[in-house]
């Protein structure tokens, strides 16, 4: 059954590794490719699986890119500004938490985890005034295009909440020594996405070493 959980610390500080089990299956030859949301793949210095051979790499960026913005999901409120004083907003992302509190320091951030349905259930139970989720994920799940949805889903502009590097891009990983798979993935690689992803992740790699914790990147 789907579950939600809350923690005292954001995911980045807890050292959560979202790709670890799949990385191991790929490196061990159990699977030949793994499909990820690019934002979940660690930057170079945190990609733990690549400390040993065989190393893995991003073989293709699928396109086109979905909207990279984050979205406020709520039953009542349409914007960060309209949330009540002391409102409870669900997010386990340190990036989102820091930016939310920068513009609304009165908000109470709830470290909520679980799949989208489980998080929406917490909203339905009245435990939260809003959730921050990726627009791309909501669109792929059909929530944004559901005319019967009871949720208000409003994108948050980047000058209020800057998205994660690579958000909205689907990436496919493979083993570096698997020439056949690399050749096949080259045929489906999206050129514009590769340029955007390489640029954004290069910036992430450059600044990420300043963070004092392991696991998922905080920016």
Image (spheres, rainbow, N blue to C red):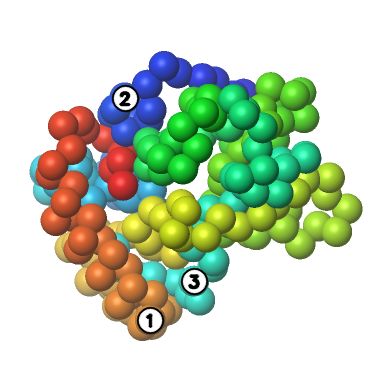
Contact flag, marks 1 and 3 (Cβ < 8 Å): yes
| Residue 86, percent from left and from top | 59, 25
| Residue 8, percent from left and from top | 41, 16
Residue drawn at point x = 81 percent, y = 57 percent: 146
- Whole-angstrom CA distance, mark 1 to mark 2, is 34 Å
In this rendering, position of residue 197 left or right of residue 91: left
Tell me the number on the disc at residue 192: 1
Tell me the number on the disc at residue 3: none
Can residue 22 be seen here? The reply is no
Can residue 46 be seen here? The reply is yes
Label 2: few (<14), some or many (≥20) within 10 Å?
A: some
Residue drawn at point x = 27 percent, y = 35 percent: 215
Helix, strand or loop under label 1: helix
In this rendering, position of residue 135 left or right of residue 158: right
Tell me the number on the disc at residue 65: 3
| Residue 204, percent from left and from top | 23, 55
Which residue lies under the disc numbered 2? 14
Residue drawn at point x = 45 percent, y = 71 percent: 62
In this rendering, position of residue 213 left or right of residue 74: left
């Amino acid at each position: 059954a789907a579950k939600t959980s809350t923690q005292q610390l954001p995911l980045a500080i807890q050292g959560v590794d979202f790709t670890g089990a799949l990385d191991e299956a790929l490196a061990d030859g159990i699977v030949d490719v793994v499909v990820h949301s690019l934002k979940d793949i660690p930057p170079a210095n945190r990609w733990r699986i690549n400390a040993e051979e065989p190393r893995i790499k991003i073989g293709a960026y699928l396109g086109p890119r979905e909207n990279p913005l984050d979205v406020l999901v709520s039953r009542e409120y349409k914007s960060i500004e309209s949330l009540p004083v002391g409102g409870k907003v669900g997010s386990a992302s340190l990036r989102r938490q820091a930016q939310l509190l920068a513009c609304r320091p009165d908000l109470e951030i709830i470290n909520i985890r679980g799949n989208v349905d489980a998080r929406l259930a917490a909203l339905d139970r009245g435990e939260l005034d809003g959730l921050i989720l990726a627009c791309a994920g909501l669109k792929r799940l059909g929530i944004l295009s559901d005319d019967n949805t009871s949720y208000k889903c409003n994108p948050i502009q980047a000058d209020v909440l800057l998205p994660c590097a690579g958000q909205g891009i689907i990436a496919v990983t493979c083993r570096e020594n698997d020439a056949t798979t690399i050749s096949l993935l080259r045929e489906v690689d999206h050129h514009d996405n590769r340029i955007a992803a390489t640029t954004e992740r290069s910036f992430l790699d450059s600044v990420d070493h300043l963070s004092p914790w392991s696991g998922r990147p905080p920016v």
